């Protein structure tokens, strides 16, 4: 499995349960050993030395802290474990995640959303080039999800590279510029979301005064593919010029158009077609990977 | 200034990091111990038992002056005997249990809280974390023994006076010399206690369950006691961990008998080194998949 995360990317890492996303992140962070192969972060193997994580921070699954210590104490402990000038960043990290007011409370009393946010604060202490976040919005209420999304967006806008594993496809679509979609431990797509959508082709829905005749016209028309019926409407895939020719052919055949509209392809549609179907969409050629080059 | 720029603060190109190390982990482990109830439970028990013992002697000595164990007849004559008697009886389960409370918990609690993955993804190598935690568990054990001994000296002296002590050879030593012997005995007692720490660390690392590790450590200690009293196994007696808890008695002989102390060192090492080594390797190589 190769992942190419460019500097400045907000990179979505998608896959169904059991696809190996969290396992992969754990290997990247040196928490588990690969049964075969190696992991390289900025050219260094986290299994060999923790120095491989010098420019990396993040959390796998829910971030965890000592519940009997305050949020600030937890950050002080982790900053001490990071060394250098990490302790100097505590106040600003708390401010960034908007937890300054609750910093002296015990983490045991924090809500799930607050723990997620202090998890990001703990990551920021390391001044990372690459932030690895595993399902950061999972379990949050709608307001918490929105806040988390805004926080990640803000960090990304300010230049931080983020690798985001998530089940929330709408969130990934909104936040990420590039994605990797993994199925049973293998990448079935890696590249820009825009390329993925473009590669999938535009899907149109059509309703006419004579759908039977319209179906025949569609099947015979050059540039029109994958003609089928869905929910009583004719669906097909085509480029824009072919659609213009089709409208003329339909009129000439006496099947007057009642509705002809492009159907928006969502990341969710593509995700399911890649992870449940047989299709592999090549929006961009997979390349040898190093994180955040 | 953006949030990230601000967080980065005084980032400089070379980014030198004053490296965190074993001392950092050790310091923070002690800090964490100060914020956990089980620490005070163990240290509280270590302090309370001598006090209860002295109270029991106070109410009992009017009726009966002693029993059939070492120093029994001196219980009401010198308070310096109290810590020695506590050492004698504490070896059965009290001190192993107090020691296990922290040694058995120190890794397992990280699994319970899911915090191992949090600390392992910082800038410390696993061996540094292991060493810091091991030292903290050992420090707690040392504190428990010396708190217990000191409280016993004070409470015993208040009850029976700060008087001279009769050694196991029958000679009498002055109170100051007796006090010196008490603290030397506490030091020697740390040899088997150190082994209990190592067994606790091993079980804490392997079981990843605090209760199992604490109870398991105590069970190992009790198992040695059991083997020691089984008929036909007398030849094993000198090599049992439980026997080494009596090594300090060599100090209470005239002249000092060093042989049980020397034996305690190598017998305890025989148990402690494999336990600590295994715990170390398990911790170094283990996958952290939970939490």
Image: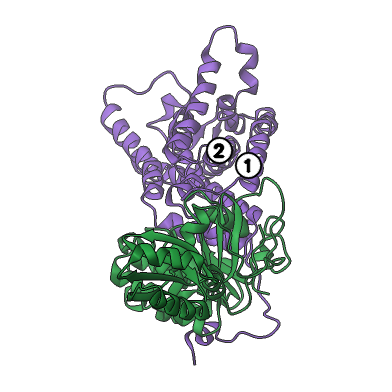
**What chain is tagged by disc 2?**
B
Left or right position of A281 against A16: right
Residue B134, position as x, y percentages in the image: 58, 48
In the image, the chain rendered in green is: A
Left or right position of B57 against A250: left
Q: Name the residue under label 1.
A: B282
Q: Are marks 1 and 2 in contact (CB under 8 Å)?
A: yes
Asked if residue A166 shows in the view, the reply is: no
Determine the image quadrant of residue A112. bottom left
**What chain is tagged by disc 1?**
B
Left or right position of A272 against A288: left
Q: Name the residue under label 2.
A: B206
Residue displayed at 31% across by 61% down: A232
Closest to the observer, A253 or A38: A253
Residue A100, position as x, y percentages in the image: 36, 78
Q: Residue furthest top?
A: B232
Check the image and report above or below for B184 versus A13. above
Residue displayed at 29% across by 66% down: A141
Check the image and report above or below for A53 versus B274. below
């Amino acid at each position: 499995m190769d992942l190419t995360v460019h500097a400045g990317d907000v990179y979505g890492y998608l896959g169904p349960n059991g696809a190996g996303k969290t396992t992969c992140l754990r290997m990247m962070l040196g928490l588990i050993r690969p049964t075969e192969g190696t992991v390289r972060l900025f050219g260094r193997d986290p299994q060999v030395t923790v120095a491989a994580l010098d420019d990396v921070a993040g959390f796998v699954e829910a971030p965890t802290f000592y519940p009997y210590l305050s949020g600030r104490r937890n950050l002080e402990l982790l900053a001490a474990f990071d060394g250098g000038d990490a302790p100097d960043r505590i106040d600003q990290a708390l401010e960034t995640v908007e937890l300054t007011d609750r910093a002296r409370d015990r983490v045991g009393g924090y809500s799930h959303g607050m723990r997620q946010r202090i998890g990001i604060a703990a990551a920021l202490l390391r001044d990372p080039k690459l932030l690895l976040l595993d399902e950061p919005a999972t379990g949050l209420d709608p307001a918490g999800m929105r806040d988390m999304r805004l926080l990640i967006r803000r960090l990304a806008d300010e230049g931080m590279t983020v690798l985001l594993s998530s089940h929330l496809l709408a969130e990934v679509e909104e936040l990420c510029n590039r994605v990797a979609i993994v199925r049973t431990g293998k990448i079935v797509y890696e590249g820009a979301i825009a390329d993925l959508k473009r590669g999938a082709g535009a899907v149109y829905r059509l309703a006419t005064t004579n759908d039977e005749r319209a179906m025949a016209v569609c099947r015979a028309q050059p540039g029109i593919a994958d003609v089928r019926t869905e929910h009583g409407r004719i669906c097909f895939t085509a480029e824009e010029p072919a659609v213009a020719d089709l409208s003329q052919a339909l009129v000439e055949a006496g099947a007057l158009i009642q509705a002809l509209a492009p159907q928006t392809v969502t990341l969710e549609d593509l995700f399911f077609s890649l992870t449940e179907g047989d299709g592999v969409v090549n929006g961009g050629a997979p390349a040898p990977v190093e994180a955040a080059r | 200034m953006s949030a990230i720029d601000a967080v980065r603060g005084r980032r400089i190109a070379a980014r030198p990091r004053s490296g965190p190390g074993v001392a950092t982990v050790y310091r923070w482990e002690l800090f964490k111990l100060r914020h956990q109830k089980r620490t005070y439970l163990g240290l509280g028990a270590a302090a309370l038992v001598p006090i209860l013992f002295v109270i029991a002697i106070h109410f009992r000595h009017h009726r009966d002056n002693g029993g059939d164990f070492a120093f029994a007849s001196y219980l009401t004559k010198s308070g310096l005997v109290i810590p020695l008697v506590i050492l004698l009886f504490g070896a059965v389960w009290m001190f192993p249990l107090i020691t296990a409370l922290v040694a058995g918990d120190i890794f397992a609690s990280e699994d319970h809280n899911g915090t191992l993955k949090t600390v392992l993804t910082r800038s410390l190598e696993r061996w540094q974390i292991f060493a810091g935690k091991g030292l903290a568990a050992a420090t707690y054990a040392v504190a428990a023994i010396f708190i217990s001994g000191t409280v016993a000296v004070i409470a015993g002296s208040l009850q029976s006076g700060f008087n001279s002590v009769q050694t196991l050879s029958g000679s009498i030593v002055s109170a100051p010399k007796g006090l010196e012997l008490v603290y030397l005995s506490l030091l020697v007692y740390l040899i088997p206690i150190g082994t209990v720490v190592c067994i606790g660390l091993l079980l804490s690392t392997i079981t990843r369950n605090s209760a199992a590790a604490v109870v398991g450590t105590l069970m190992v200690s009790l198992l040695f006691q059991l083997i020691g009293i089984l008929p036909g196994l007398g030849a094993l007696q000198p090599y049992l961990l439980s026997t080494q808890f009596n090594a300090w008695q060599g100090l209470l002989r005239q002249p000092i008998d060093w042989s049980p102390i020397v034996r305690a060192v190598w017998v305890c090492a025989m148990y402690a080194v494999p336990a600590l080594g295994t715990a170390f390797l398990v911790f170094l190589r283990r996958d952290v998949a939970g939490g």
